[in-house]
Image (cartoon, rainbow, N blue to C red):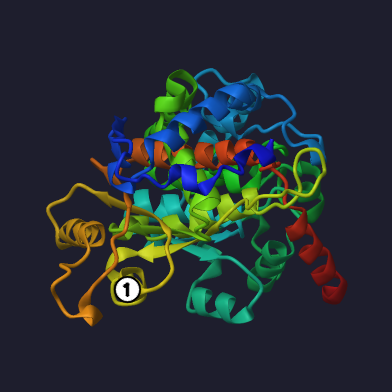
Amino acid sequence: MNSELNFEKNNYMDRENSIEYIRKVHGINFDLSNHKIPKKFHEDFEKLAQENRIFEKFQAIYNGEKANRTENKTVTHFEYRKKDPHKKFKDETDFMLQKADQISKKSFDKIIFFGIGGSQLGPLLLGEALISNFHEKVVMITGSDPEEFSEKTFNLNLEKCIFLVASKSFSTMETINSFEAVTNKNFLKSTYAITSNVNGALEYGIPQENIIPFDGSTGGRFSCWSPISILLAILEGEKKYKSFLEGGMNADHDLLENKTLSPSFMLSCQDIYNNNILKNQTTLILNYDWKLRSFSKYAQQLEMESNGKSIDQNNQAINIDTCPIIWGGYGPESQHSFYQMVYQGTKDFNINIIASLTESLNFYQFKGQSESLIAGSEKEIEKYKITNHRTPTLITIEEISPLSIGVLMASWENKAILNSLFWDINAFDQWGVELGKLNTQKYFQ
């Protein structure tokens, strides 16, 4: 199908005759009206979705068909956020919540969380967004540099800490190595493993009652819906954890029921237009909430690990561009970092700007910067002062809550999956990453 995405650019340059898409979904307002996606492209994109059964393919993935062909696996992260999940997934969530409640009642100084990639980026985003004073309660250890271990655990009384080891395979080199470097394999009675390799954790010495399983077909970058996000349940309780899952479920239902009207579909339309028509090589994600400062890192892994592919589902080389480079940051910092290039540089970007609706300087900056990007400069001024006109999508959140964050994250995930269906690639494997692991293991041994 990817050859069909070779739209003629000249057919879609009438950006004055553009769509006016503004839609609120469960407390989040998605405004693509400034993005100036041509009506003709939008119409042809909808036709392409229908002709290639994009929504039927998404429904099949959601229902559990084996979409990850190279690993012969289903895609199971949806199960954790369904209203009526299969019993296995409900049992895993219930067991995790039981353990989370037990841990929350213990007396401890800190929780030390060992994880990397999706096992870290999702929990980190949720922690910063939804857990009060998160970094006072939790130490996140991500990798292999001893400087990180020593700095983050300096002056901690490890005997008064809870240890969480998040690794699907329970063999992730950085995670196991960092745990051993910090603990010397002591404190196993206060160590909990969140993993799909129960036997591996048992053999390692983790007490059976401390092993919290989740499904092996749940990809790491999609695993925030699984017991991997136990921190949210420990520190904020079952109600908020389930509200987060409900937000994800709401985003799924919106896409499945409303299809072309859903934000996920429209964000996919925006991505394909920028990537395959305008040939913009990057997507810029900016947020104006300190609590969401890690969202661009989460989205970067989600999109680039899912869709950074050059082989299609038929094992053939792709003849179009797939995933753009995802970058971004916290708006108030970025204004004093790279905004100059955004305003007056020679590159163009696909831009998304996110903010919650608060009476604060952050929100005023969001409004002021967005207006400045959209309107550009008056032409009468000196040339060196003239700024470019940009076309950002504006996403505003009524309130940062478990429900709204669930909607936002699931909408972004579903958009990335839709992109993969249009590009006809497998969004659920990561063989390039596996090669790096193998070669590192060779030197590590």
Above or below: residue 94 compared with residue 232: above
Residue visible at 63% across and 20% down? 86
Residue visible at 38% across and 43% down? 236
In the image, 231 versus 118, the foreground residue is 118
**Kind of residue at disc 1:** Gln
Q: Residues within 10 Å of mark 1 (few under 14, many from 20)?
A: some
Q: Quadrant of residue 144?
A: bottom right
Q: Residue furthest front?
A: 10
In the image, 131 versus 220, the foreground residue is 220
Residue named by callout 1: 344
Q: Is residue 226 visible?
A: no
Q: Is 155 on the left-hand or right-hand side of 340?
A: right
Coordinates of residue 59 in the picture (x, y in percent): 60, 22
Mark 1 secondary-structure assignment:
helix
Q: Quadrant of residue 396?
A: top left
Above or below: residue 52 compared with residue 145: above
Above or below: residue 321 compared with residue 416: below
In the image, 37 versus 13, the foreground residue is 13
Residue visible at 41% across and 29% down? 262
